[in-house]
Image: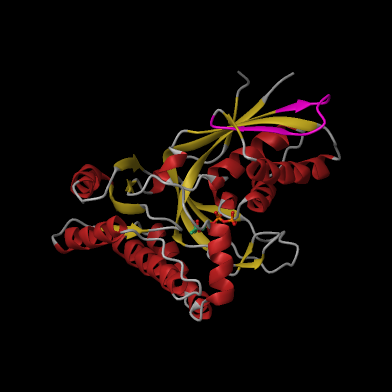
Amino acid sequence: MTVSRARASANVALAKYWGKRHEGLNLPFTGSISVSLSGLETEASVALRPRQSGDTVRMNGQPASPREAERIGRFLDLVRDQARAAVRAEVDLQSNFPVAAGLASSASTFAALALAATHAFGLSLEARELSVLARRGSGSAARSIHGGFVEWMRGEASDGHDSFASQIAPAEHWPLGIVVAVTDEGQKKVGSREGMAIAVQQSPFFPAWVETHAADMDAIRSGIAERDLTRVGEAAEHNCLKMHAASLAARPALIYWTPATVAVIHRVRELRADGLEAYFTIDAGPQVKILCRAPDRSRVAEEIARVPGVRRLLLSAPGPGAEVLPPL
Ligand code: DP6
């Protein structure tokens, strides 16, 4: 029996997805813009198992937890619906970045799985359809279908067919330096899914987050086109701080930062004041991603490594999109 394999990179949002207008379909309140992260990848393999009565899922060499297996099974049901098939599958997911580092792997996981599973079920989808499908697994996975710089359009339709991502510039357009500072190796306490639902319902600042988002998107989009680090970095930091401000103001409060997260924020600002241009962004967890010019990456990494509480650094750059891998 042949095994279909695919690989996809993680991504970091510069203008973030934070809040769903439809939970089941992962339809966002706003668009978002990200950059694909080279070297942080998930590989998915999918084999059809006609004699199996259920799907089996392994993640990083271990059987998936019942919760994870159910989420993957529901995603495979979407592929089975499109393929008009009922056959069960054996799925193996391997991420090369430490899950214990608390870096979200759902984007690269569902992008790789969308590609491997559609391939296994004999479907050949256009990038737009693949992005819509990956979005159903995890919103940010819609963006991991593409490499380089990517925009996920909010869309207007209630069925989500117009809420997909496309590439705005390939990785080669702008070789940025990206440093991921891991400050806490534990699993995150409130995941993105739950966190954004709390922010939507319980934060008085959520409407302001949505209303002011388009201006950041415009600055980041045009800054990418012109390779303008100052414009992209300032807008990305501002967008990140607004996402966290809205989350901090929710009830219950969502406080994703640890003392080390805050120490890295301050260090990045000091480096900038000293002439080393760098900007931070933070997702729903304590790790910090730092953007800088490619030639400055090792200097930035050296400086950030010295911040108390920083446990390890991952060096990255704009990376590739999802791709099918040859059978083993
Ligand atoms: C803060 O895509 O993980 O990283 O759609 O519920 O799976 P689900 O959420 P997810 O949320 C990512 C949130 C974020 C910002 C971003 O990546 O845009």
Q: How is the image coloured?
A: secondary structure
Residue depicted at 82% across the width and 39% down the height: 83
Q: Quadrant of the C terminus?
A: top right
Q: Is residue 246 left or right of residue 286?
A: right
- Residue 81, position as x, y percentages in the image: 82, 44
Instruction: Find residue 123 and report its image quarter.
Output: top right
- The foreground one among 22 and 60 is 60
29 in magenta: no
- The foreground one among 34 and 182 is 182
- Residue 216, position as x, y percentages in the image: 43, 70
Instruction: Find residue 185 and report its image quarter.
Output: top left
- Residue 314, position as x, y percentages in the image: 34, 41
**Tally of marks:** 0
Q: As displayed, is residue 93 above or below residue 237?
A: above
**Residue 212 visible to the viewer:** yes
Q: Quadrant of the N terminus?
A: top right
Residue depicted at 35% across the width and 52% down the height: 289
Q: Is residue 109 left or right of residue 269?
A: right
Going by the picture, which residue comes out furthest to the left? Answer: 274
Residue depicted at 20% across the width and 61% down the height: 272
**Residue 319 visible to the viewer:** no
Instruction: Find the magenta span and give its range.
Output: 47-60
Residue depicted at 48% across the width and 40% down the height: 320
